[in-house]
Image (tube, rainbow, N blue to C red):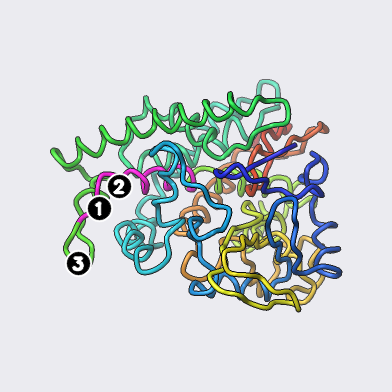
Amino acid sequence: MSSTDPQGLQVLPDELASREAWLEPFDWYREMRADAPVRYDPARRTWDVFRYEDVKRILADDDTFSVNPRLADEFQEPDRPEEGLLFETMLFQDSPRHDELRGVVNDAFEPRALRELEPEIRDFATDLLSEAVTGEDGTMDLVETFAYPLPVVVIAELLGVPAEDRDRFKRWSNTLVEAASTDEDTKEFTERQQAAQMEMASYFFEMIKDRRETPRDDLMTQLVTRERADGSRLSEEEALGTSILLLVAGNITTTNLITNAVRCFSNHDLFEELRGDADLQTAIEEVLRYRSPVQAMTRVATEDVTMQDETIEAGDRIIVWLGSANRDERQFDDPGTFVPDRTPNQHLGFGYGTHYCLGAPLARLEAAVAFEELLERTATIELVDTELQPTRSSLIYGVESLPVTYETAE
């Protein structure tokens, strides 16, 4: 298993290159926290940071640790404009530009606004489960039939994308976050990603043009018509980049949160408790700690800094390992045990600081609704004994497929 970032640099360390290691990286994290909490990997030209307090420090200090990849010594500007679209989004912008871009859409992701969306999310979940949980053979691929399509449908609905175009959304988002496999030609992989980017850019440009001319009650209209603090509006490129970010981030994180939760709940025989008096939302928070959908984030040092007796120089790239921080013995009691009622639970599953995940409230709501409806329609859920394949992504953590067996509720 091999993976590179948009610059072609290897992201996953050799220690996590195998299928088995990336499915269960936690023993290696523990070794690194103990023996090399801040280490430089010359093969990747990258610093790795593993302990909770160090990860949190980096995420909280935007001045010293930037999200802008252009500040890295190894950065090379993309050859094609569409390849650099994500670099223009709030995900890779420091303040104040990050705050301006985020401010345009922030209201739509506030918990109060999302509560109004809950009935629609529940309807979508019900429709998907009506097709998936038929009671005929008692098996389904949870990713394909439920965890994958649900967040795509929701973010498409928010943006105002017609139902008939949602399949394209699935394909584009999957292509953009996947990593090259060892058995795929690099040129073919690059061409496939470029094709997806161009198709998506063309589609969104048409949407942007339409909403400027004919505003509607959707998030895309908000993107292109809402004024920023200085009275200006997003450019077409900014609106396009934000749309792409919402599609990718709004889809992949929730898909893997739902999937990882099923793995956790099944492996620890918790479905019966969750059907009873167990606190579902607290259990979901433990999933975010125990099997974080985003295992790592990237930063670039803007100045020389010392951490754990190591000197990180300006321009150096840093990977902060959220998945390791969330298992740190210095922060959590018995961190290797899944505790569904764990409180407090100050995990970093959605990041921390200025770049704390915009879609965190939506992901939590989608996961809660998904499990309420899934538990309502099933009497039992068990994992099929099969060889799991990790997602083809460098920093996103989940599995491509999760077959389960179930009995329908009477």
Q: Residue beneath label 2, please?
A: 239
Mark 1 Cα-neighbour bin, 10 Å: few <14, some 14–19, many ≥20: some
Mark on residue 230? 3
Question: Which region shows up in magenta?
Answer: 233-249
Mark 2 Cα-neighbour bin, 10 Å: few <14, some 14–19, many ≥20: many
Element under label 2? helix
Q: Residue at x 67, y 34 (%)?
A: 400
Three-letter code for the amino acid on which mark 2 is drawn: Ala
Q: Is residue 191 above or below residue 306?
A: above
Element under label 1? loop
Residue closest to the far left: 213
Percent position of residue 125, x then y? 50, 39
Q: How many labels were placed on the picture? A: 3
Three-letter code for the amino acid on which mark 1 is drawn: Leu
Judge left or right: residue 106 versus residue 296.
left
Q: Residue at x 83, y 42 (%)?
A: 20
Distance Cα–Cα, label 3 vs label 2: 17 Å
Judge whether residue 240 is colored magenta. yes
Name the foreground residue: 19 vs 169: 19
Q: Is residue 410 visible?
A: no
Name the foreground residue: 243 vs 132: 243
Percent position of residue 2, x then y? 72, 38
